[in-house]
Amino acid sequence: MKIGIMGAMTEEIAGLVDAMGSRREQVEVGRRTYHVGELYGREVVIVFSRWGKVAAATTATELLARHGVERMIFTGVAGAVSPALRVGDVVVGSTLYQHDMNGSPLFPRHEIPLLGVSGFETEASARREAALAVERFLARRREWIPDEVASEFGIAAPKVVEGAIASGDKFFADGAELGELRGRLPDVACVEMEGAAVAQVCHEYGVPLTVIRTISDAADEGAPVDFARFVREIASRYSLGVVRSLLGG
Ligand code: ADE
């Protein structure tokens, strides 16, 4: 089974591509570089999606239509919406909403026109498998992230949860806007900019998707600084460790 692995950060893609070894091919199309080969004994195509829903959807379509991937994994970071989540916790997406979809009054708020759904559910078994892989990674977290680095980020006992993710073309960095989102989509655990776009494409092509997001910030006024620091220093260690654990490497 060919697996598409999409990442929202160049750093994490670089690490995964290195882990593929030398027997890999590079396909350049549509301003993306698709790395085709094997990772931990699995057939994979790995790509940096760029940011936002359009970038993610076009990249996902390319993976499905040109490369014929039969399973999709998306990894990256997210801002916490649930107050129970801390920096360093991991969310495996259960339902993916497009928080900026608003076809009202023609369609109910958040409903994807002509699909008749407001959120895309991921497959329970794939989600469970991903959550267990994250647990295995977190149990060995010190091999990837030493205590002194973790403590700089206030990461003590990071956890994994299965929860709803809201995606849209917006970086959240304002407590009032975050509060409004919480009121509108009360079950959302975290916010990012790509997952639900990939979920729509995967839904339409009938391919299962797993979205794994590490919390980098609290989606409030501190988010721009916290996000940049987390991405620069730590995010790729999470995605590498989690993907390795998930693929059985
Ligand atoms: N990804 C990581 N942090 C985010 C935030 N605060 N808003 C949107 N996407 C994010």
Image (tube, grey):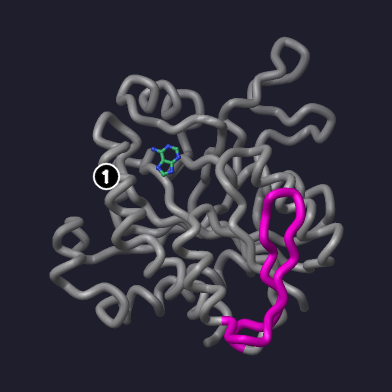
The vertical placement of 65 against 142, above or below, is above
Residue 85 image point, x, y percent: 32, 49
Rendered residue at 52%/78% (across/down): 18
Q: Residue at x 65, y 89 (%)?
A: 41
* Horizontal and vertical percent position of residue 122: 65, 55
- Seen from the viewer's position, the closer of residues 72 and 51 is 51
Tag 1 secondary structure: helix
- Indicate whether residue 16 is drawn in magenta: no
Near mark 1 (Cα within 10 A), the count class, few <14, some 14-19 or many ≥20, is some
Q: Quadrant of ligand 1?
A: top left
Determine the residue positioned at 76% across, 60% down.
63
Residue 124 shows in the view: no
The three-letter code of the residue at mark 1 reads: Asp
Q: Relative to 157, is 179 on the left or the right?
A: right
Is 137 rendered above or below residue 212? below
In the image, taking residue 188 as reference, residue 201 lies left or right, namely right
Residue 233 picture location, percent across and down = 29, 60
- The region drawn magenta spans 20-40
- Residue highlighted by disc 1: 226
Q: Quadrant of residue 139?
A: bottom left
Q: Is residue 2 left or right of residue 160?
A: right
User: The N terminus appears in which quarter of the rendering?
Assistant: bottom right
Q: Quadrant of residue 178?
A: top left
The image shows residue 13, relative to residue 244, as above or below, that is above
Q: Nearer the viewer, residue 169 or 163?
A: 169
